[in-house]
Image: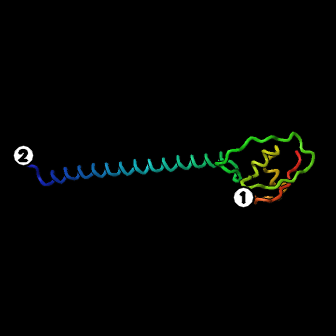
Amino acid sequence: MKPTFSHKLRAETKRYHSSVAVVLFVVFITVTLFLIIVSVKGWLDNKKSTTSKPTNEAPSKELEEVKVEPQLKSETKYTVKEGDTLYEIGIKFGINWQEIAKVNNLEEPYTLSTGQELTIPKK
């Protein structure tokens, strides 16, 4: 029996529907993978930002070993040297860098200048 026009049309329509389904499936998978990648990247960036060091600390500069004075009897003056950060100065004197910033009325981004004189509070 010879296929009629309607049989041929139905066969073409079935192939067309299956092609559209494959294309839609590929698009769905692509979009889903893209959204997963973007979500994971955002999560990783957020995790990095919450575990990062204070902004006044030099990230690539390693801290040198420093002897800490056991007790400061009164406030001390410290002259900032090139490359110093509040974090490093705080370690030198055994004081939290945020206390040094507070006593010296420093605000973010806690920029220090070479030769600047800081008051280091007693412990």
Q: Work out whether residue 77 or residue 53 is closer to the camera in this orientation and state it.
A: 77
Q: Name the residue nearer the viewer: 26 or 106.
A: 106
Q: Residue furthest left?
A: 1
Q: Give the Cα separation between the discs numbered 1 and 2.
A: 86 Å
On screen, residue 78 versus residue 30, left or right, reads right
Please report the residue visible at 74 percent of the width from the left and 41 percent of the height from the top: 65
Q: Amino acid at mark 1?
A: Pro
Nearest the viewer among 93 and 54 is 93
**Residue located 80% across and 54% down the image:** 101
Residue for point 65% across, 47% down: 52
Labelled pair 1, 2 in contact (Cβ < 8 Å)? no
Q: Earlier in the sequence, mark 1 or mark 2?
A: 2
Secondary element under disc 2, as helix, strand or loop, is: loop
Q: Which residue is mark 2?
A: 1
Q: How is the image coloured?
A: rainbow
Report x, y in % for residue 109.
Answer: 72, 58
Q: Report how many numbered discs are placed on residues in the image.
A: 2
Please, what secondary structure does the residue beneath circle 1 have?
Answer: loop
In the rendered structure, find residue 109 and report the number of the disc placed on it: 1
The amino acid on which the numbered mark 2 sits, given as a three-letter code, is Met
| Location of residue 2 in the rendering, given as x and y in whole percent from the top left corner | 7, 48
- Residue at coordinates 15% horizontally, 50% vertically from top-left? 7
Q: Which mark is residue 85?
A: none
Mark 2 nearby-residue class (10 Å; few <14, some 14–19, many ≥20):
few
Specify the quadrant that holds the C terminus: top right
State the image coordinates of residue 99 (x, y, percent, origin top left): 82, 50
Q: Residues within 10 Å of mark 1 (few under 14, many from 20)?
A: few
Q: Nearer the viewer, residue 46 or 82?
A: 82
Nearer the camera: disc 1 or disc 2: 1
Q: Is residue 56 left or right of residue 92?
A: left
